Image: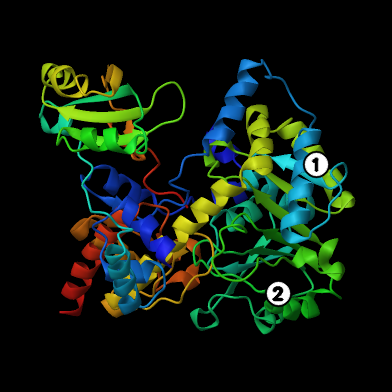
Amino acid sequence: MKLEILSLLEKNSRMTDAEMATILAADAGAVASAVHELEADGVIRGYNALIDWEKFGQEMVTAYIEVRVTPQRGQGFDKVAERIYQFPQVQACNLMSGGFDLFVVVEGRTMKEVALFVAEKLAPIDSVLSTATHFVLRKYKDRGVLFGQQHKDEREAVVL
Amino acid sequence: MNLKDMLRRNVVDTPPSGIRKYFDLINEMKDAISLGIGEPDFETPWSVREEGIWSLEKGKTHYSSNAGSVELRQEICRYLKSRFSLQYDPVHEVLVTVGGSEAIDLALRVLVGPGDEVLIPEPCYVAYKGCTLFTGATPVPIPLKAENRFRLQPEELLAAITPRTKVLLLGYPNNPTGATMDREDYVRLVDVLKDRDIIVISDEIYAELLYQGKHASLAEFPEMRDRTVLVSGFSKTFAMTGWRIGYVCCHPDLMEQMKKIHQFAIMCSPTTAQYAAVEALKNGRPDVERMVAEYNRRRRLMVDGFRKVGLDCFEPYGAFYVFPDVRKSGLNSDQFCERLLLEEKVLMVPGTAFGDCGEGFARATYATSLENIREALFRIGRFMEKMLG
């Protein structure tokens, strides 16, 4: 049941325990306690709204930054990753396989703000060898949801 | 010359489907929610669409053999065997049609004509009666009961059989009720049918949309296999309604005649759809499972919602319809649906559209988003509060 609860909440975190219980043909109390456990165990890390900032009229810039670093003796990449992810501008930070080491997602209000953050904060860190910054120009799909045009039901209104 | 005098009587006398007025009303409304759409809201899985596109890119734009491409017929047989343990010969017993609709029409055309009777358990899909009337045969409705969860009972069948009965037209899982028939239900029908000269046309287009138990078919009984015409297709299972592709399986003696009509009237089913259908059968299983899981969630929400606002409904195990009893509102089917649409902008289809015995019921489909279902149920609840005073 927990797996099903997670898949429902991942799509719509506002779904109530009662509704999940109906949808999953489960006991409402059992659903509530499962959700509580998932939260307590840290499986559910938070509940976010997926926002189309552009639609709201708020300028928002996202950059994906490839970072190459020198791993440190005894600590590998963890130490440098920690130095990077502490910045509030950093939305995500992942260790990668392949041609670079860390993949950092940074959000800011303007391109300049993000570029300055990279130049002044990220690049100067001792073990950072190089950065390559890619700005998002248009968001088509995020976390499984299509951005831009709203989906329109084009079916005939009544079909037998 | 009066053109109307030139027309065939039995076509003119067949009424069109009775939902036109709702269609006109809802099209003028803003923020209306339609629970009246009898087709998946999902789009065809991308890999299936992509296969259709690819076939066009490769210039595969010609006729296939009349019965459908060999590859598709083989895949259909493989699928029917692995999913439902039904064995058909791809060369002599399978025909790819323009949707399940063509298959029903073909089967009726080769089997019945003036003087013959076709037994049609109701409520049912609207085309059964119309297609029967076009052949000149007489449709004989068998009114099914809600207390039997709209399953055909052997005594109901027996009571309707006359010396002129030639065909029994079944549709399970059912549109509009969502009813299903178990193997045990069929066992009891087989007793009635096996020693009589009655052919069963079994429309199993919703076979995959099943939320409880295992799909059963009359064709799986050895004594019924050769007297059953199995109709199915891709529209509901793979969300491929617009592609117009289905199939029919039956004994070669019937098939030969059906093929002849199909050959002269249709030539062959759209080939783009045929290529796409092969991909659907080969690799579409995970998509089907995903869609069925989602329908099931919506189904539970909808059944629960109707019951909570005071509309009784039995739990439907198949298709994507709920068929609540609306009599508690104090209205008949038509009044209920019309007022619900005008006052709350929610469209349901009156049960009477599916046969006279649908009076007192209305059909709602959950082939729409959870958000729509939630909002529609809220509005129906408000409507019922008003009705119950």
Do the dots labelled 1 and 2 sit on one chain?
yes
The residue wearing badge 2 is B183
Name the residue type under label 1.
Gln
- From the viewer's perspective, is B151 left or right of A114? right
Query: Mark 1 touching mark 2, by CB under 8 A?
Result: no
Task: Report the front residue among A48 and B325.
Answer: A48
The residue wearing badge 1 is B74
First along the sequence among labels 1 and 2? 1
Residue B284 in the image, given as x and y percentages of width and height = 61, 43
Type of colouring: rainbow
Q: State the residue at coordinates (34%, 31%).
A: A72
Q: Describe the element under mark 1 as helix, strand or loop.
A: helix
Locate residue B66: give its quadrant.
top right
Name the residue type under label 2.
Arg
- From the viewer's perspective, is A154 left or right of A46? right
**Which quarter of the rendered picture does the C terminus of chain B lie within?**
bottom left
Evaluate whether residue B112 shows in this view. no
Evaluate whether residue B26 shows in this view. yes
Q: State the residue at coordinates (40%, 65%).
A: A2
Residue B1 in the image, given as x and y percentages of width and height = 55, 30
Furthest residue in direction front, as rendered:
A73
Q: Describe the element under mark 2 as helix, strand or loop.
A: helix
Residue B319 in the image, given as x and y percentages of width and height = 53, 60
